[in-house]
Image (cartoon, rainbow, N blue to C red):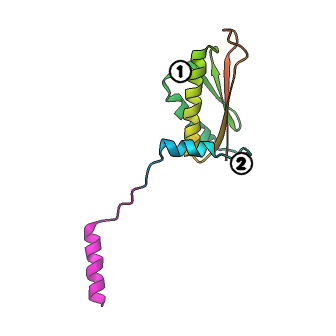
């Protein structure tokens, strides 16, 4: 019995280690996790997590027109003005950041504020993040 055990063990070692493939997170999975989020903030988020979320937002091509500011548990997205084009761009950036938050297993909510469509009023978007 001992010889058979050693033969099997040596054969397993010759074949190499088992490779376990983990499925990557799909876009559908991220969107479902965004939809089913709890609205009550429970814990604060680490600054490294907020910075990772901002990096994801800066990957969007139009992000160069916006300024990102980190606060305690939220990210402010400041746009130049609020014409319709900038509202759409802010929505794209917020969606990218919400998907990154979902990937990090964090809850988030987004809000876009614009006082009017005049060039004098800047666009302000807020992304609140919590565990």
Start and end of the magenta stretch? 1-21
Element type at mark 1: helix
Q: Looking at the image, is 37 positioned above or below residue 78?
A: below
State whether the magenta stretch is mostly helix, strand or loop.
helix
Dot 1 corresponds to which residue?
64
Location of residue 58 with respect to 19 vertically, above or below: above
Residue 55 can be seen, yes or no: no
Establish if 92 lies above or below 5.
above
Residue in the picture at 72% in, 44% down: 39
Bin the neighbour count of mark 2 within 10 Å (Cα to Cα): few under 14, some 14-19, many 20 and up: few
Lateral position of residue 73 relative to residue 67, left or right: right
- Neighbor class of circle 1 (other Cα within 10 Å; few <14, some 14-19, many 20+) is few
Q: Is residue 19 magenta?
A: yes
Nearer to me, 94 or 9: 94
Which residue is at 49% across, 41% downward? 27
Label drawn at residue 32: none
Q: Residue 14 or 24: which is nearer the viewer? A: 24
Residue appearing at x 57%, y 33% in the figure: 95
- Residue placed at 52% from the left, 46% from the top? 29
Where's residue 82, x and y in %? Answer: 64, 15
Q: Earlier in the sequence, mark 1 or mark 2?
A: 2
Q: Nearer the viewer, residue 88 or 5?
A: 88
Viewport quadrant of the N terminus: bottom left
Magenta stretch: residue 103 in it? no
Q: Residue 89: give x, y in percent of width and height.
A: 56, 22
Please tell me the numbered disc located at residue 43. 2
Q: Quadrant of residue 106?
A: top right
Kind of element beneath mark 2: loop
Residue occupying the far top of the picture: 119
Work out how far the residue at label 1 is from the one at label 2, CA to CA, in angstroms: 31 Å
Q: Position of residue 129 (x, y in %)?
A: 66, 40
Residue 71 visible in the picture:
yes
């Amino acid at each position: 019995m001992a010889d058979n055990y050693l033969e099997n063990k040596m054969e397993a070692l010759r074949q190499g280690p088992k490779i376990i493939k983990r499925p990557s997170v799909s876009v559908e999975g991220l969107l479902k996790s965004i939809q089913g989020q709890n609205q009550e903030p429970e814990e604060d988020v680490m600054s490294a997590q907020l910075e990772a979320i901002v990096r994801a937002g800066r990957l969007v091509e139009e992000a160069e027109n916006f300024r990102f500011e980190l606060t305690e548990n939220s990210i402010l997205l400041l746009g130049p003005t609020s014409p319709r084009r900038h509202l759409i761009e802010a929505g794209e950036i917020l969606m990218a950041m919400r998907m990154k938050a979902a990937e990090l297993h964090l809850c988030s909510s987004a809000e876009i504020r614009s006082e009017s469509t005049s060039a004098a009023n800047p666009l302000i978007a807020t992304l609140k993040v919590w565990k």
